[in-house]
Image (tube, rainbow, N blue to C red):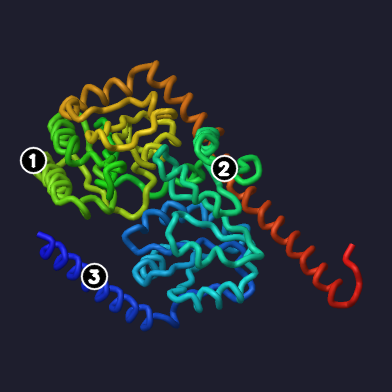
Amino acid sequence: MPLKRDLELARGLAVRAWKSRRQRRRLDRIGDAVRQPEPGTVRVAVYFADTAVNMYQIRQWYAPLAHLAETVPVAIVARSPGAMLALLEESPVPVVYARQVVDLEEFVESQPLAMTLYVNQNAKNFQMMRYGRMWHVFVNHGESDKMYMTTNQFKAYDYAFIAGDAARARLEAVLWDYDLDRRAVPIGRPQADHASGTPPFEPDGRIVVLYAPTWEGDRPAATYGSIATHGVRLAEALLASGRHRLVYRPHPRSGVVDRDYRRAHEAVVAAIEAANAATPGAGHIYDTSPQLGWQLTTADVAVTDVSAMIYDRLATGRPLLVTRPASAEADVDERGYLGAAEWLEAAEAGDVVDLVDRVRDDPEARRRLEHWVRRYFGDTTPGAATRRFEEAVLQLVERRDDFARRADASDTGASDGTTPS
């Protein structure tokens, strides 16, 4: 068995290396056509060091960044050839390819950067964070109560843009000697103001249920994924009801670690295909589109795992069910919303139709939901979060420029023999 695993690992590394070389050659061919930002223009960089498999982390920021770029110049910095190719096709703002550190240095030296935003905790973030005379701000790629949201890595950044009171309480409970008043800036969920895309179906009276499970995880404490424990029975029940339309949107990494998890995912996809073939007007969807927007706002009820998707949905203020992890080792923090969530146990997956009806119609469930929406995101009036995000960015741009002016004045005073005031 160890030999087989070693061979599989070696094969995987060889395939990734081959793909990387092919992607680099494609970038070399189209290099002159890449829309590079003009030197001396970019004030806000968004740093993405991950590969294409984690593009979902940057995609959800496209719309807020496009809106921000109407006020202050923004560019995304990509470090991976695969991510760069995807960004060239998708990004609404200019993209810079900095595969090597020397490329990163050239970009930083050519632009008057006031701040860099980080959407994840990639180890390569530190290659950008070594540059001074700009703020380094962690914005994350979603809100959740997972342990990832209280990592001590928050302290590495000058500031963190957080969603609201719940995020602040999480950090306060875990991080020692962290100045929340100065460094944690609440902005809500600006992505909720920019729901993208339109549903590929017309409203026809069917109850739309979004099932958006996460992947299986890479360690016991993070085994939040439900496809293998809940997904097949859940899908079969909704597909058989005749009253529901299932929108199945699994995490892009579903099945990359666990073969059984991948088989369960494939079974759900096959069940959707069979249901559509049997009833052509049913319109069930296996959704792999890059953008997330209409799925959250259109669904009458969402079913999610313990993941950031809970909070993406929560920001819309609409009903949801949360799958209870079947593994006792999964680390579930029930001090926040999860302590009052509408849980779906694995044994109840086949009864999901009744549970969907209940969370839609129960006034008490609605009241609980409204409380937690305010707790996590504050004012969710359309446009409010976008204003808070952009005001926070502009304040830090101004603060950076003020620091830079004072530093320049000090340097000038020292060089001409005068004493700076």
Q: Name the spot of residue 242 as percent of width and height, x first.
A: 15, 30
In terms of sequence position, does the residue under pointer 1 or pointer 3 come before the other?
3
What residue is at 36 percent from the left and 26 percent from the top?
341
The image shows residue 10, relative to residue 138, as above or below, that is below
Quickly name the residue at label 1: 278
The image shows residue 343, relative to residue 8, as above or below, that is above
- Marks 3,2: beta carbons within 8 A: no
- Indicate left or right for 110 with 121 as reference: right
Is 48 or 192 nearer to us in this picture?
Answer: 48
Q: Which mark is residue 3?
A: none
Quickly name the residue at label 3: 13
Disc 1 to disc 2, C-alpha distance: 46 Å
Is 7 or 265 nearer to us in this picture?
Answer: 7
Q: Identify residue type, mark 2.
A: Ile
Quickly name the residue at label 2: 187
Instruction: Mark yes or no: residue 301 visible.
Output: yes
Q: Name the spot of residue 409 as percent of width and height, x first.
A: 82, 68
What residue is at 44 percent from the left and 29 percent from the top?
336
The image shows residue 238, relative to residue 49, as above or below, that is above
Mark 3 vs mark 2: give the one in front.
Answer: 3
Q: Quadrant of the C terminus?
A: bottom right
